[in-house]
Image: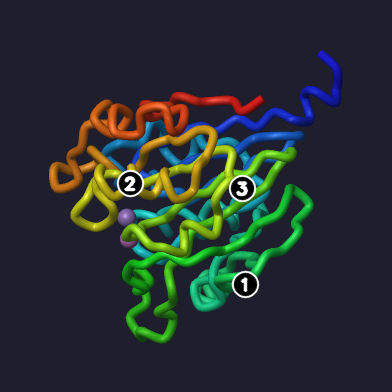
Amino acid sequence: MKASVIGRMLTITFHGHACFTLEANGHRLVLDPFLTGNPAADIPVDRLAKVDAVLLSHGHGDHLGDAIPIATRDGATIVATAELAKFCGQRGATTHAMHIGGAHQFPFGRVKLVPAFHGGQVEGDESGRFTTNPCGIVVTVAGKTVYHCGDTALTLEMQLLADQVDAMLVPIGDNYTMGIADAVRAVEFVKPRTVIPMHYNTWDVIKADPEEFARGVGARAQVVVLRPGQAHTLA
Ligand code: NI
Ligand code: MN
């Protein structure tokens, strides 16, 4: 295979709940690394391969998760909204603070933070000083753009991403986030090539059938249902 072809491939691996790793061009990123205490996780945190960066959608425990220990172990940078980055930085992690609407070019690719409608408390912040706006993460690596919605309601802001996304990682579990019907509308708004459901079946309260979601999306996008530990490559 020619190097130019390899350079255009991006592998997305699901680790349960809202945790994914992205691998391309010798770089590895982890998004929302909730492994310890995650009943759906396929691996314990000590089996997560070394990452370059940890990208966080928000500070809830099921997203912040193992971010700080992973970042300190691997010398990886935590990329998050400024308040959450500050919280992680004060606990020993290398961080890069950003905020919603802003993008930054990193060695591994480009990250833009986009709106998400959700709660902003940071797990472990007894002071309340680090409460922040949750976000969605738009990350472009190897010419492929992945949109991790984070925990969010359906929002019209998603329409701003129309036709810019190769793979959309969308919550379908309801209760805390969009359920299936709203997630299908989110796919209509964003028009991704591929959509991967997340944030469901971790606990009973977010029980959802990914095949029902796939039927709802129909021909609007390729729906890839990943079990924890499974991967999908965008070529
Ligand atoms: Ni949350
Ligand atoms: Mn969550």
Q: Amino acid at mark 1?
A: Ala
Residue at x-position 70% and y-position 34%? 24
Residue that carries the numbered disc 3 in the rendered image: 164
Give the image location of residue 103, x and y in percent. 68, 65
Q: CA distance from mark 2 to mark 3?
A: 17 Å
Instruction: Say if disc 3 is inside 8 Å of ligand 2.
Output: no
Q: 91 or 172, which is in the foreground?
A: 172
Q: 4 or 186, which is in the foreground?
A: 186
Residue that carries the numbered disc 1 in the rendered image: 97
Helix, strand, or loop for circle 3? loop
Can you tell which quarter of the image residue 134 is in? Answer: bottom left
Can you say whether 55 is above or below 50 in the image? below
Give the image location of residue 82, x and y in percent. 56, 76
Residue at the extreme left of the image, as rendered: 204
Nearer the viewer's eye, disc 3 or disc 1? 3
Quadrant containing the N terminus is top right
Q: Amino acid at mark 3?
A: Gln
Quadrant containing the C terminus is top right
Residue 75 located left or right of residue 120: right
The answer to which of marks 2 and 3 sits earlier in the sequence is 3
Residue that carries the numbered disc 2 in the rendered image: 183
Residue 10 located left or right of residue 143: left
Can you tell which quarter of the image residue 8 is in? Answer: top right
Give the image location of residue 179, x and y in percent. 24, 48
Helix, strand, or loop for circle 1? strand
